[in-house]
């Protein structure tokens, strides 16, 4: 099988959850299928972060994204003999001479008005929503990260349930509790943090709800905040959150790291006494899984996907309940035995999300898409 893969998510200096997921999938898939070929297609600026004997990378300049999506990409893959296209996000060609499989991680832009930071974003979302419904109709298969996302995609995009395949994400091998202590200490020193902080990582979009946990942490007793400062990683920083973090009371107990290198993330998880994830909405919640895999107890919101992911291995708070976040932080930071029990449950939970299982399940969906196309009578093919 010749698998085309859109790799534009791998932009220099831009480490995203989708990019990390795609790296892990290709790392495992290329080893599991040494006789298959993987055609990685990106724009002129993207990186190639996985390079094996059965990978070939092609770059096509992207002057106008819709043209690249709908014309340049399918033409290039057809010329190279691709049997199927796998896209790690919802952007796919609506017409192609081969089956198209898309992963839809979440539908935040449908469900959260605060996802749109500029007035123009709301206008762009109108045609984009129409496009998403067309993707759900035209794709040979749709992969989602969770049962929660499957429900959303079916309800909001009208997707055929037979096309939906739940394939949970997984963590890379680096996310483990037993890291090199000397190397970890060097990472903490480089970022100016000492072990025992409260850690949060991810985008700073409004739906991530970061200001609420910042205020909740600021409401803790001063001595507790001093022992367990709040460390935030990610970006870009919205103006309102920037103002909040500059206020004297909050600045004293909070450290903003900005976007951190992916190689440093496991050590930063391992250095935390507690990982906090207050998001209003997630399609999966990869940072929570990474924290559990690193042996860090998790306090997260009651967003359905996060409850689905963490189960009884985490404590949960309603994302709107600021007093609940303060109380949750206070209780866990004061109780090391409870945190130790959560760490044990989290490690067991995280062990069930293996890269080999994730990659194998995605490859199975791709196999089925190709097989169905080959079985389909020529006169009935839509393309």
Image (spheres, rainbow, N blue to C red):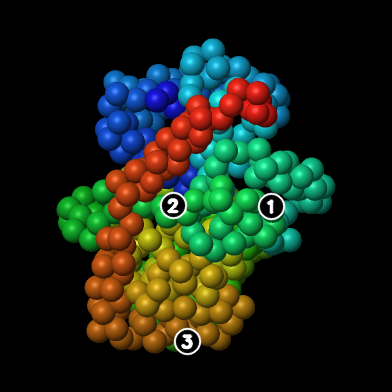
Residue, far top: 79
Residue 107, how many percent across, how many down? Answer: 63, 55
> For mark 1, what is the residue?
157
Say which residue appears at 71% left-offset and 41% top-offset.
134
* Residue 72 seen by the camera: yes
Q: Crowdedness of circle 2 by 10 Å Cα count: few (<14), some, many (20+)? A: many
**Rendered-image quadrant of the C terminus:** top right
Question: Residue at (39%, 87%) from the top-left corner?
Answer: 331
Say what secondary structure mark 3 lies in.
helix
Taking the image as drawn, is residue 215 in sight?
A: no
Alpha-carbon neighbours of circle 1 within 10 Å: few (<14), some, or many (≥20)? many
Of helix, strand and loop, which one carries label 2?
Answer: loop
Tell which circle, 2 or 3, labels the residue nearer the N-terminal end: 2
Instruction: Using the rendered view, name the quadrant where residue 161 is placed.
Output: bottom right
Q: Where is residue 163 in the image (x, y as percent from the top left)?
A: 56, 47
C-alpha distance separating marks 2 and 3:
34 Å
Q: How far apart are marks 1 and 2 (CA)?
A: 19 Å
Q: What element carries label 1?
A: helix
* 181 or 34: nearer the viewer: 34
Identify the mark nearer the N-term, 1 or 2: 1
Rendering quarter of residue 349: bottom left
Look at mark 3 in the image and give the residue it sits on: 327
Figure label count:
3
**Quadrant housing the N terminus:** top left
Residue at horizontal 55%, vertical 70%? 303
Q: How far apart are marks 3 and 1 (CA)?
A: 38 Å
Mark 2 in CB contact with mark 3 (< 8 angstroms): no
Q: Which of the labelled discs sits on residue 167, or is there none?
A: 2
Where is residue 102? Give x, y as percent. 55, 40
Q: Is residue 201 above or below residue 5?
A: below
Does residue 286 appear to the left or right of 111 in the view shown?
A: left
């Amino acid at each position: 099988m010749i698998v085309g893969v859109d790799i534009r998510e791998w932009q220099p200096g831009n480490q995203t959850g989708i990019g990390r997921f795609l790296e892990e999938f290709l790392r495992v898939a290329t080893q599991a299928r040494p006789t298959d070929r993987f055609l990685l297609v990106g724009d002129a600026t993207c990186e190639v972060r996985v390079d094996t004997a059965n990978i070939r990378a092609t770059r096509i300049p992207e002057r106008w994204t819709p043209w690249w999506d709908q014309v340049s990409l399918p033409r290039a893959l057809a010329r190279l003999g691709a049997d199927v296209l796998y896209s790690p996000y919802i952007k796919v060609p609506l017409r192609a001479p081969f089956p198209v499989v898309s992963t839809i991680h979440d539908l935040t832009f449908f469900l959260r008005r605060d996802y749109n930071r500029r007035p123009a974003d709301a206008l762009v979302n109108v045609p984009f929503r129409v496009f998403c419904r067309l993707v759900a109709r035209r794709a040979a298969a749709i992969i989602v990260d969770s049962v929660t996302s499957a429900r959303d995609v079916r309800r909001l995009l009208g997707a055929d349930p037979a096309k939906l395949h739940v394939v949970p994400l997984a963590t890379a091998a680096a996310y483990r509790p037993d890291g090199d202590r000397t190397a970890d200490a060097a990472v903490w020193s480089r970022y100016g943090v000492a072990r025992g902080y409260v850690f949060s990582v991810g985008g700073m979009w409004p739906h991530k709800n970061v200001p609420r946990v910042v205020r909740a942490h600021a409401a803790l007793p001063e001595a507790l905040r001093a022992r367990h400062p709040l460390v935030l990683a990610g970006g870009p920083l919205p103006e309102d959150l920037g103002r909040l973090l500059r206020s004297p009371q909050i600045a004293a107990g909070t450290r903003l790291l900005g976007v951190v290198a992916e190689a440093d993330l496991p050590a930063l998880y391992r250095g935390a006494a507690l990982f906090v994830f207050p998001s209003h909405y997630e399609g999966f919640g990869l940072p929570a899984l990474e924290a559990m895999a690193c042996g860090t107890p998790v306090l997260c919101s009651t967003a359905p996907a996060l409850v689905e992911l963490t189960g009884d291995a985490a404590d949960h708070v309603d994302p709107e309940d600021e007093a609940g976040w303060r109380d949750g932080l206070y209780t866990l930071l004061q109780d090391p035995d409870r945190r130790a029990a959560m760490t044990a449950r989290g490690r067991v939970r995280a062990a069930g999300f293996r890269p080999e299982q994730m990659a194998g399940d995605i490859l199975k969906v791709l196999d089925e898409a190709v097989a169905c196309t080959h079985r389909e009578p020529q006169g009935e093919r839509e393309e």
